[in-house]
Amino acid sequence: MLQSAIALTGTPPWNLTSPIDLPVVGEQHSFYPLHFPVRLLSPPATGYSQPAMLSAMPADSIHGLASITVIPLPDPFTTSATNNGVFCEGDTGVVISLSSSQTGMIYSLLFNGLLEGTVVNGTGSPISFGVKNTPGQYSIRGVNPLGNCIAMMNDTVTVIMNPIPVTDFTTTTVCNSDTTFFTVSGNFTAKTSQWHWNFGDGTFAIFNAPTDPWHVYPTYGTYTVTLSVEDTNNCTYSISHPVEVRPHPTAFFTYSNAQLSG
């Protein structure tokens, strides 16, 4: 239901009527203020202007015509974000979009109910408001500039940033053919769903829970070991450390046979 107003001149009272074949439906009333509202039912999709016939009471009063223009509201489209508004710490963020738009309308992005500053003109096609990485609630407002008619678009998007599963490990320094032991540490180990170990010698190990693995290297040397983890939010983190395997010491000695003389 929309509402407009007609200003009347002359001496009250007045009675407002409208032709029955027009899309403007005015209820008959007698009003004494100079301005009074007119209810408009079922406006068309575009702005229009129709006359409302004024009949005065009593019969010898002056008759006149008033014109009412109805400005349509922007059509409601749907607000959405990539990955349902969820991203991992360190990523660029998510893209907020509107499923479609109307040419001539102006669309503004709101953050937590306040204008965020991003304004996009309607194109008749879906529109994007760019990448956003500040957690909070985003919504979109449409404005018809012809009458500053405002309508909120459907749905809101809640942007959530999940922390990355920062994890580390320590290791022992051993000699060739001995066992190297690894110890896992970190603040998010309980949330981590996959642990992928690259021992640096062409061998790998995968665990579904925090595990302190061990490994025997084929020969001495320095190996780069990488631990890559992924948590239940699909956030990932990798850490690498050099691991030293020392050679066993080699003992050298000489000897000579004793010479006996008689």
Image (cartoon, rainbow, N blue to C red):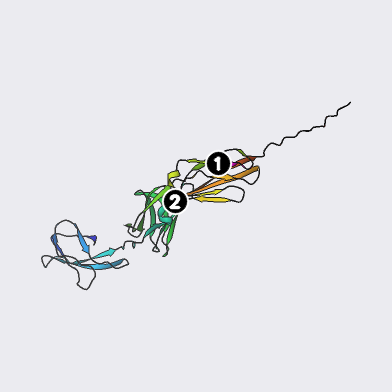
Residue 114 vs 97, above or below: the answer is above
Q: Is 48 situated left or right of 121 in this image?
A: left
Q: Residue 127 got which mark?
A: none
For residue 20: magenta? no
Label 2 Cα neighbours within 10 Å, binned few <14 / some 14-19 / many ≥20: many
Q: Quadrant of the C terminus?
A: top right
**In front of the other: 93 or 33:** 93
Residue 91 vs 98, above or below: the answer is above
Image label count: 2
Residue annotated with mark 2: 87
Point out residue 107 in the picture as x, y percentages from the top left corner.
39, 57
Q: Is 128 situated left or right of 39 in this image?
A: right
Residue that protrudes farthest toward the right in the picture: 262
- Amino acid identity at mark 1: Phe
Label 1 Cα neighbours within 10 Å, binned few <14 / some 14-19 / many ≥20: some
Point out residue 169 in the picture as x, y percentages from the top left corner.
53, 41
Residue that protrudes farthest toward the left in the picture: 58
Identify the magenta region. 176-181
Q: Which residue occupies 44% across, 58% down?
A: 128
Q: CA distance from mark 1 to mark 2?
A: 34 Å
Would you say the residues marked 1 and 2 are in contact, meaning their CB atoms lie under 8 Å apart?
Answer: no
Point out residue 29 in the picture as x, y percentages from the top left corner.
14, 62
Residue 72 vs 239, above or below: the answer is below
Q: Earlier in the sequence, mark 1 or mark 2?
A: 2
Q: Name the front one of labels 1 and 2.
A: 1
Point out residue 105 in the picture as x, y percentages from the top left corner.
38, 60
Residue annotated with mark 1: 181
